[in-house]
Image: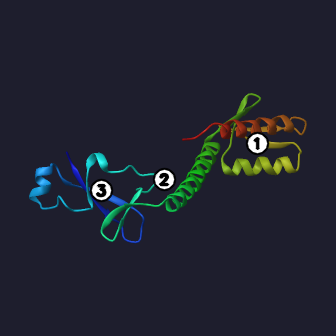
Amino acid sequence: MNFYKASQEIDKPFITWDLWAKSEEQLIAMEENENPLILPENEVPQNQFGVCPMKIDEGVLVLRDEVEMQGYEIEYNQRKTLITAAKRANIIKAAEFVYGAHSYPMHNAAQMRYNAVAASPKGIDMMTVNGDIVNISSGNLPGFLDAYYNKIIEVTNYTIE
């Protein structure tokens, strides 16, 4: 059985586990069998909310208290929410939507143009994904914008893991 030694990063709540011995005999030969920072592989805890549920306190491994772990959980969930939002924004930027016989881009500049057009609805030229210029008449603009908004809803409705 492998044995791992805990070490804490300075000024950070992270514990790293370094392989210290490949057997109990090796651990005893190194005179480390009583070291409170060394655990057998099957007792090394998995990280929760991005941190080890144990910490080093005065040279000994101790469990983090519930309040401390709740703080890490909140921070982890906030970070996860931001990452998910960023992934969705990137998916939107890479997406296309179809109106009529043409596909239209959804990158940032295109989104700004569509929003400007929605605020002042009149016929306007739009560039397709292929670089073609297509005139969207004022009468067709609501359908064009519906296709755009529906694609945003479609892209943002599925879960990103």
Check the image and report above or below for 90 versus 147: below
Check the image and report above or below for 75 versus 12: above
Image spot of residue 61 (x, y percent): 33, 62
Is 75 or 82 nearer to us in this picture? 75
Image spot of residue 3 (x, y percent): 22, 52
Between disc 1 and disc 3, whose residue precedes? 3
Query: Horizontally, is 57 left or right of 75 in the view?
Result: left
The residue under label 2 is 49
Label 1 to label 2, Cα distance in Å? 46 Å
Query: Horizontally, is 140 left or right of 1 in the view?
Result: right
Q: In this view, which residue lies farthest toward the top? A: 101
Is 146 or 46 nearer to us in this picture? 46
- Which label is found at residue 126? 1
Q: Secondary structure at mark 2?
A: loop
Do the residues under discs 3 and 2 have CB atoms within 8 angstroms? no
Between disc 3 and disc 2, whose residue precedes? 3
- Which label is found at residue 102? none
The residue under label 3 is 17
Q: Quadrant of the N terminus?
A: top left
Q: Quadrant of the C terminus?
A: top right
Q: Secondary structure at mark 3?
A: strand
Q: Secondary structure at mark 1?
A: strand
Kind of residue at disc 3: Trp
Kind of residue at disc 1: Met
Kind of residue at disc 2: Phe
Q: Which is in the foreground here, disc 1 or disc 3? A: 3
Between disc 1 and disc 2, whose residue precedes? 2
Q: How is the image coloured?
A: rainbow
Label 1 to label 3, Cα distance in Å? 56 Å
